[in-house]
Amino acid sequence: MSILRALHTRVNRSGLLLWALPLALLVVFFFYPLFAILRVMFEHTGAIFISDIWQPLGFTFYQALISTLLTILFGLPAAYVFSRFDFAGKRLMRMLTMLPFILPTVVTAAAFNSLLGPRGWFNLLLMKLTGSATPPVIFLNTFGAILIAHVFYNIAIIIRVVGSAWSQLDPRLDHSARVLGASPWRSFWQVTFPLLRRPILSAALLVFLFDFASFGVVLMLGGPSFQTLEVAIYSQALHYLNLPMAGLLSLIQLACTLLVTLVYGSVNRGKTIPLFPRLRGEGTSKPRAPWEKGIVFLTITFLFLLQVLPLLALATRSFVRLEADRGQRGGVETGLTLEYYRELFVNRSQSVFYVPPVQAIGNSLQYAAVTTLISCVAGTLLAYAMLKKGAARRWLDPLVMLPFGASAVTLGLGFIVAFSGSSLAGASFPWLVPLAHSLIAMPFVLRAVQPALASIPVSLLQSAAVLGASPLRVWWEVEMKLISRALISAALFSFTISLGEFGATTFIARPDNPTLPVAIFRYLSQPGAMNFGQAMAMSTILILVCAVSLALLEKFNQFLTGMD
Amino acid sequence: MSRLEVIDLHKDYENNPLLNGVSFFVDSGETLCLLGSSGSGKSTILRIIAGIETPDSGQVLWQGRDINAVPVYRRNFGLMFQDYALFPHLNVAENVAFGLRMQRFPQEKVTQSVQQALEQVNMTAFAERRVTDLSGGEQQRIALARALAASPQLLMLDEPLAALDRSLRVELQEELRALLHETGIPAIYVTHDQEEAITLGDRLALLHDGRIVQCGLTEAVFHYPANRWVAEFLGMTGLLTGMISARDPLTVQTECGELHPQSIPGAAVPVTGSTVTVLVKPVGLNIGLDDATADVLNGIVEDVRFLGDHYRVNIRLCSGTIFSVPTATAFPVGDQINLQLSPGDLLLLLE
């Protein structure tokens, strides 16, 4: 009878067992490293300068705030266009705007580099036109580069979250306001906007959170003069070897992100975006009036320039040979080539690594596969455990979401502090990278699977049992089938996260065993056309993988629409 | 001949007794209607019989054998849920086939039984449809087909029509009634709707305060409600409180004068001075005819409704009670009328 009882309340006494594996993962690979950071702070001596805290902290808030405001400013018109108009290529465009969101930061850096960098298409074109010997546009290492990259990344959040809320607003609300005498403008401010306030706030906080924890973008596009907390942790730990300082910064970072996460959670608690039953396509129409056509055209053009052009620049750049060295005029001799791709398989002694880059691809794929497995199993177990109500859940719930608020760099720092020199150290234990990735991916898995699991009516499971299905078959034939879409989405997402993860991996991956993003980063930092070209080639491969993964995600829709 | 019997079921829900000694049985060829207000524990009884829940004490016997230890998936009972619980990831035919597959019938037999079950509910044309595209009535039919397909030994239906609109409900009541008699499987039908219970039940079992307060043939229950609660639950309105003033002939003193009700055959009549209820049966009353030998009740016509083939007249009795009576002709509102009551029209109810 105990199996039945467990079936009936889904998880009853066995709840603790469900917690065990994910909790063990968290304790060993999150809380222990966090504790290790604390210990290092107090045990080691290092120089702690208050100015070294205030400067990155202030800048982190400042850039996150400006980035968020810009993202909202540009995102809201796009959300409006996507939620109210039908136009040719809407699906494709929607997908293309989502692509940057899942792109690795190194790829973003490479993409903007290939478009606006000193050897990017834009500067090459201007140099050719003006005959200038130096690149006329300075984009890299500017504040503007950081801001543009952040908008590039996160505009998808505004479009998705606000756009979906907007498209789910009952158009009759607007219609009745208009019938009651409101002008379109007043109807927007009096009816539509108040209803969208909560989704806008929720999306803005999410954008702020991502901008706040931005690492790769700031490191690679902002250059040495801009330091967010994340970059400061990185340079304190790896460049100045000042672990206490890095640890202190990590804790400050953790506290800040936790705060924002809490605010985000309270904004989303009991959210009541009016969800009226509506027909598909109700409230959307083809743009007819000139201003409608205008706004759709402008939005699409803007999104194309912001999000698609850099990726196209990157992809084309990987197939074009430019023999000239930096700033060398006249020697620019263009030609199509596959050389950079072929070169990936060659092991050159002057290469940054002593292994051919293709091995980095192999590493990344392996790590991504392992990450997918670990995060999906652990995340699904957690989702089951979360169904159980009671005191245990109330305590463990925030504990589980803590890694969500922790930054990748903090996690990476914690890993090297906790495990370097131990038997789990990189050399003997290659699993640290996928484990770190799993911790980063697990909250995403949880957020995808838990709602799917919670929405299964108990009567379905009981019905299956009455029809003769044993508990195991109920689980397999009903529960697993019903959450399969969510699980596939979660798996794809984990895979993509792992493939592109940079912050934690820079700390953990061994120099002679890099992942793809780490390799791209190093190639980008090296001079020479060949290194640049190879970075472009590897980035293009990553874009392709991300695009395929995104296309599949769209197919299994669910996670992305449930992103809010 | 199959028989399901439950004996003295007890079940607490959040430390309050929900079932407080429930016993009844059902035989093959008959439908037992379990009737009770919502929250009375009707569904819990079904879930205990199905094996989804365990009783705190008491027995469930199938063919005389205690099956408390048999797990839900080995009982081979059919249970139709109130929300139908159709599997959204399976189409109509796959839903119907689910039970057969779980019991590992050969593919040939599965196909054949699915076809047969869909025929029984007139849904063969829907076999390949997605269940999420079906209307409420169609879902109800598929849920029934799914419950019947695996030839359960016992069929339980948990308010199967509650989610449907009225006209559809009446139509499906008839279909269900025919189907249940055709299959001959012992059936337990749970509802809070007395009309549904009359249509479908061969016998009624009324659940109140965690006990079965009355169980018997549907007609018998209507003729002789066991107590005031049963009469009220069945929608009877002519209830007058009074005190027994004499036992032979049985006389009850009420606010509306002395009445002479019959007592339920075989039931003990309380002692003189006891507080009791007299039920005025609404059918076949003499209105306005002068007959000195019978008891008379005076009242004022409050409201008259025309219902197609008869009228329903609401009469305010002297006690203030509104008594609702079907009549062949209309009466003017506000008129005083006399109800001439013969001994068969009045029944003594026990509290």
Image (spheres, rainbow, N blue to C red):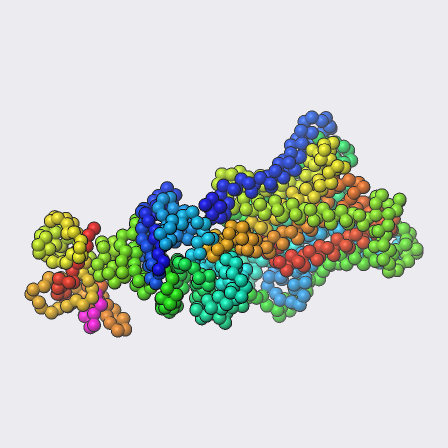
Please tell me how many numbered marks the rendered image carries. 0
Image position of B265 (left or right of B186): left
Q: What's the residue at 77%, 49% (across, down)?
A: A362
| Spot occupied by residue B245 in the image (x, y as percentages of width and height) | 9, 51
Q: What's the residue at 60%, 61% (across, down)?
A: A83
Image position of B239 (left or right of A174): left
- When the figure is inspected, residue A111 is found, relative to residue B111, above or below; the finding is above
Q: What's the residue at 84%, 51% (across, down)?
A: A345
* Residue situated in front as seen by the camera: A260 or B318: B318
Q: Is residue B250 magenta?
A: no
Q: What's the residue at 69%, 56% (across, down)?
A: A549
| Quadrant (top left, top right, bottom left, bottom right) of the N terminus of chain A | top left
| Spot occupied by residue A375 in the image (x, y as percentages of width and height) | 64, 46
| Spot occupied by residue B253 in the image (x, y as percentages of width and height) | 11, 54
* Residue A116 in view of the camera: no
* Residue A192 in view of the camera: yes
* Residue situated in front as seen by the camera: B51 or B297: B51
Farthest right residue?
A331
Q: Is residue B330 magenta?
A: yes
Residue A47 occupies which quadrant of the picture?
top right
Image position of A72 (left or right of B246): right
| Spot occupied by residue A478 in the image (x, y as percentages of width and height) | 53, 55
- Segment tinted magenta in the rendering: B325-331
- When the figure is inspected, residue A249 is found, relative to residue B142, above or below; the finding is above
